[in-house]
Amino acid sequence: MVIQDILTGFVFGVAAGLSPGPLMALLISETLKGHKKNGILVSISPIITDIPILIVSLFILDQIKEVQHLLSAVYFVGALVLFYLGYKNIKLKELHIETDLTGSLKKGIILNILNPYTYLFWFFIGAPYVSNAGFLGGFLFTIFFFIGITGSMILIAVFTQRLKSFIESRYYIYLLRFIGVLFIVFGLILIKDGLSKF
C-alpha cells in the first residue's frame, strides 16, 4: 500500500504540474521574461496554498465521517471531477500557452488560491485519499504529490526554451490524453471506495 500511496500522489502531482492553465502560463512567462529563479518561485507556490486547503478539507471530512451517505457522496463527486478532467484531456485537440502574464511567487499564490480546481481536488479527491490511507499513507501521498507538482514545474522552468515547443506539440497532447485515462481510472477507484462507505 505504501508504494501505491507514493505512486498515486506522484502521478496526481505530475498531472497537476503538467496541466495547461494560468499557473503554467505564468511559469513560462516568468521564466522567459525574467530568470529561471522566478519560474522556480512560481513552481513552489502550490505548497504554500495547498497545505492549508488540505488541512481544512481533512477537518471538514472528519466532521462528516460519521454520516456515511454524505461521506460516500464526497467520493462520488470526486469521481465525477476526475471523469470530467479525464474527458477534457482525452478530447483535447490543440493547445497554445499564452505567456503574457506577469508576476512571481506572490502571483503564483494568488492564481492558485483563485483556482477552483485546487479546492475541488483537495476536498473531493486528495483529502478523502489521505483520510482513507492512514497517517503514513496520507503523509507519503501528500509529500509525493508536492514532489510531483513542483518537480515537473521546476523542470519546465529550467528547460522552458526547449519545452515550450514540446508543450505546443502533438506529443504533449498525447501525454495529456494518457493522463486523462489515468484520471478516469482513479475516478473508478473513488467510486469503489465510495460504495464501501455505505
Image (cartoon, rainbow, N blue to C red):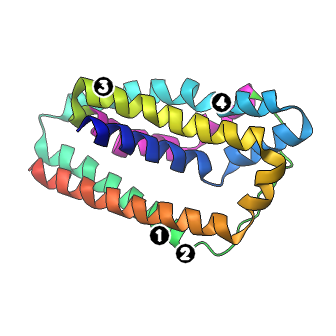
The Cα–Cα distance between marks 1 and 4, rounded to whole angstroms, is 27 Å
Residue range in magenta is 105-130
Circle 1 packing at 10 Å, graded few (<14), some (14-19), many (20+), is some
Q: Residue at x 79, y 27 (%)?
A: 37
The residue tagged 2 is: 91
The kind of secondary structure element at disc 1 is: helix
Residue under the point 76% across and 34% down: 39
**Kind of element beneath mark 2:** helix
**Could you say which quadrant of the image residue 131 lies in?**
top left
What x and y, as percent, mark residue 142? Answer: 40, 31
Question: Which residue: 80% across, 60% down?
Answer: 165
The answer for how far apart the CA atoms under marks 2 and 1 are is 6 Å
Measured from the top left, where is residue 196 in percent x and y? Answer: 11, 50
Q: Is residue 187 above or below residue 28?
A: below
Name which residue type carries label 1.
Tyr
Task: Look at the image and tell me in which quarter the N terminus lies.
Answer: top left
Q: Is residue 123 magenta?
A: yes
Q: Residue furthest right?
A: 33
Viewed as shown, does residue 47 lie left or right of 171? Answer: left
For the residues labelled 1 and 4, say whether their Cβ atoms are less than 8 Å apart.
no
Cα gap from disc 3 to disc 2, whole angstroms: 36 Å
Camera-side residue of 88 and 34: 34
Measuring from the top left, give residue 46's x and y in whole percent.
58, 32
Instruction: Check contact, mark 3 vs mark 4: CB within 8 A.
Output: no
Whether tag 2 and tag 4 are in contact, CB under 8 A, the answer is no
Evaluate if marks 2 and 1 touch, with contact meaning CB atoms under 8 Å apart: yes
- The disc, 1 or 4, on the residue closer to the chain's N-terminal end is 1
Q: Which residue is mark 3?
A: 59
Alpha carbon distance from label 3 to label 4: 22 Å
Instruction: Determine which residue is flagged by label 4.
Output: 109
- Is residue 146 left or right of 182 when viewed as pictured? right
